[in-house]
Image (cartoon, helix red, strand yellow):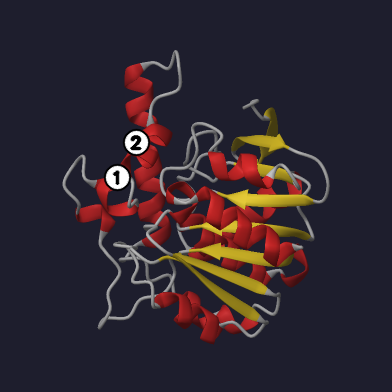
């Protein structure tokens, strides 16, 4: 498995790591909880048929600072600028979990920014009768068991890169948690429901059947709110981060939708 190429994008307030691999039509990817410290199997599968481009989200590993982002509009503007700078304007876009919430915001506000949209268990909605898990109240060391049906996949991705300073790596993880809290507080309700009808792009909604963070029936809530043509795909046996639990089935669903 070859590593992706890496470039640095200069944005307002800092720099952003951009990974790229593959050839063909560009496909953007916004990572989920914790961000990316290594190139995961799903992206390798997608890169067999597309040029996969991955800008790091603010506050996450490789991303610009997030301390000035105080509201959803701040986050949406920051991500729109990252996508434009990475050459993804008008491209297909995948967003996972927290990245899915931001991908939906960008698609809703800047309709020409996103060609087709793939949302993998995105945050953004909240139903008090079927509440989203409060991930910020979890006991230390339990996050992997909650976000993945196969926790080892998350633990492997969250390992410190080879040669990383232990203290600096711990600080980076704390910052990633702070970024998620800034983006999602309270409990993932970002009022995205108000903006979903502005999404007119064809959209694939992917959800793990064993999601312990956001109930899988939220897939239908998203589909009902989006005005564009939608397709829902439930991945059997996968948890919240279905991209880590089941990269093969997820890549098949995504590439079939984008064919």
Q: Is residue 69 above or below residue 223?
A: above
* Label ID, residue 226: none
Could you tell me which secondary element the residue under label 1 belongs to? helix
Residue 144: mark in rendering: 1
- Is residue 75 visible in the rendered structure shown here? no
> Which residue is located at x 55 percent, y 40 percent?
41
Q: Are marks 2 and 1 in contact (CB under 8 Å)?
A: yes
Q: Is residue 74 or residue 171 the one in the foreground?
A: 171
- What's the CA distance linking mark 2 and mark 1? 6 Å
- Residue 130 in view in this figure: yes
Quarter of the image where one finds residue 204: bottom right
As drawn, 145 above or below 238: above
Q: Residue at x 45, y 45 (%)?
A: 67
Q: Residues within 10 Å of mark 1 (few under 14, many from 20)?
A: some
What residue is disc 2 on? 155
256 w.r.t. 192: above or below: above
Name the residue: 62% across, 79% down: 230
Query: Percent position (x, y) of residue 249?
Result: 54, 56
Identify the image quadrant of residue 156: top left
Residue 181 against residue 189 in the figure, above or below: above
Q: Which residue occupies the extreme left position in the image?
A: 139
Expressed as whole percent of the image width and height from the top left, the position of residue 259 reads 77, 63
**Tag count in the figure?**
2
Most extreme residue toward the right is 24
């Amino acid at each position: 498995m070859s590593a992706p190429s890496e470039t640095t994008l200069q944005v307002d307030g800092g720099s952003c790591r951009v990974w790229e691999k593959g050839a063909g039509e560009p496909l953007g990817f916004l990572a989920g909880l914790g961000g990316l410290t290594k190139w995961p199997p799903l992206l390798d599968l997608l890169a067999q048929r597309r040029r996969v481009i991955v800008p790091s989200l603010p506050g996450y590993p490789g991303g610009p600072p997030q301390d000035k982002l105080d509201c959803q509009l701040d986050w949406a503007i920051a991500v729109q600028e990252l996508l434009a700078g990475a050459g993804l304007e008008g491209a297909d876009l995948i967003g996972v979990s927290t990245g899915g919430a931001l991908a939906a915001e960008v698609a809703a506000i800047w309709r020409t920014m996103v060609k087709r949209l793939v949302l993998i268990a995105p945050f953004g909605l909240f139903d008090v009768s079927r509440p989203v898990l409060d991930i910020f109240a979890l006991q230390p060391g339990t996050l992997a068991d909650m976000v993945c049906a196969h926790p080892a996949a998350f633990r492997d991705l969250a390992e410190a890169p080879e040669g990383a300073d232990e203290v600096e790596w711990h600080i980076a993880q704390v910052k990633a948690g702070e970024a998620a809290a800034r983006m999602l507080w309270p409990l993932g309700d970002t009022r995205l429901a108000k903006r979903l009808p502005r999404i007119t792009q064809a959209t694939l909604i992917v959800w793990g059947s064993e999601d312990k963070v956001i109930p899988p029936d939220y897939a239908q809530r998203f589909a009902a709110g989006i005005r564009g043509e939608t397709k829902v795909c439930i991945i059997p046996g996968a948890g919240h981060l279905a991209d880590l639990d089941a990269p093969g089935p997820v890549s098949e669903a995504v590439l079939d939708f984008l064919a």
